[in-house]
Structure formats: C-alpha cells, structure tokens
Image: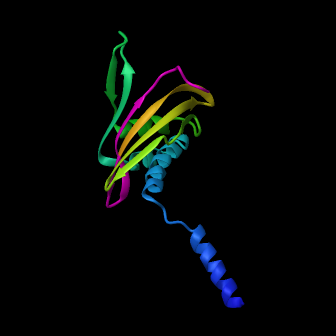
Amino acid sequence: MKKAILFFVLLTAAYNTKAQTASDSVKAVINQLFTAMRNADSATIVNSFSEKYTLQTLVRDKDGHMQSKNELVTDFGRNIARLPKNAADERIEFASIQIDGPLASVWTPYKFYFNGNFSHCGANSFQLLRGKDGWKILYLVDTRRKEPCEK
C-alpha cells in the first residue's frame, strides 16, 4: 500500500512539474522586458535584447505621414531608468507566438499607462533569436495611437 501511495505522489508531482516550453521561454523574455520597464531597470532592459538588434516605433510626422523612428536600446533603457518605479506600465496580451527553430515571432497588443494614467495603445511585433544565452529580442517595432483603444 505504501508503495502505491508513493508511486501516486511521484506521478502527481511529475505531472504538475511541466518543463518550460519554447513558447513559455519566449514569453518569459518579453515579460522580463516589461517588468524591467515597470522597475526602471535599465540593465535588464538592455540584457533582453540581442547584440545586433533593431528597436523601432512607427510615428506620424507633423504632416501626418507614417515614419519609422529607430532608437538605441541603451538610450531607451536610460530614459526608463530616469522614471520612478511603476511609472511606465505597458500591459500586453500575447496574441500570437510562432516558433521555427531559433526564430520566434510574437504579436502583442498593448495598453500603456504612465504614472497610473492611460496614455496610449498599439501593438508590438517582436522577432526573437535563440542563441547560446537563450532567447533575445532581435527586432521590436511598435505602433502607438490614442484611439481606438478599450480602456
């Protein structure tokens, strides 16, 4: 009887202890980025990106034309680090995760809150590369708009 109980306990423990899937590890890197933003943690922001990365935002110029604006991740991290903790709060949803070997493509609609107040919404498009140090963000581009956004 004791062996049967022990077997059941071990089986239950094994069932409840799931190995992290590739999707889980991709989500972890992206969640790490947004946690670092909330914590004003520049080092973790920079560490979330690959050595060779692209960080872009799609913005309208003064004439209303859409343009892409590149940013250095070190500048982005430095700007976030100047903020108090919890000032920059980007709340994302994982809409799509596609993985093929060392490449992951992720789509995350978001709502951004600054100092607790709704600021804007949009979507992030991530490309991640799995290398010797795990998943890193290779490319991130986002859109930004005030509406239509559901608060």
Residue farthest toward the top in the current orientation of the protein: 63
| Residue at x 43% of width, y 46% of height | 97
- From this view, report whether residue 61 is shown above or below residue 30: above
At x 37%, y 51%, the residue is 99
Provide the residue span drawn in magenta: 128-151
> Which of the two residues, 8 or 103, is positioned nearer the viewer here?
8
Q: Which residue occupies the foreground of this view, 16 or 124?
A: 16
Q: Which image quadrant is residue 117 in?
A: top right
Q: Is residue 135 magenta?
A: yes
Front position in the image: 87 or 122: 122
Residue 17 percent coordinates (x, y): 57, 68
Q: Position of residue 144 (x, y in %)?
A: 45, 25
The scheme the figure's colours follow is rainbow
Asked if 143 appears above or below 129 in the picture, the reply is: above
Q: Is residue 100 found left or right of 27 in the rendered image?
A: left
Instruction: Count how many numbered circles sit on residues in the image.
Output: 0
Residue 103 vs residue 1: left or right?
A: left
Q: Residue at x 61, y 79 (%)?
A: 10
| Image quarter (top left, top right, bottom left or bottom right) of the N terminus | bottom right
Q: Toward the viewer: 134 or 48?
A: 134
Residue 127 sits above or below residue 141 on the image? below
- 48 within the magenta span: no
The quadrant of the picture occupied by the C terminus is top right
* Vertical arrangement, residue 133 with respect to residue 55, above or below: below
Image coords of residue 82 (percent x, y): 50, 36
Q: Residue at x 60, y 30 (%)?
A: 115
Residue sticking out furthest to the right: 1
Q: Quadrant of residue 70?
A: top left
- Expressed as whole percent of the image width and height from the top left, the position of residue 114 reads 57, 29
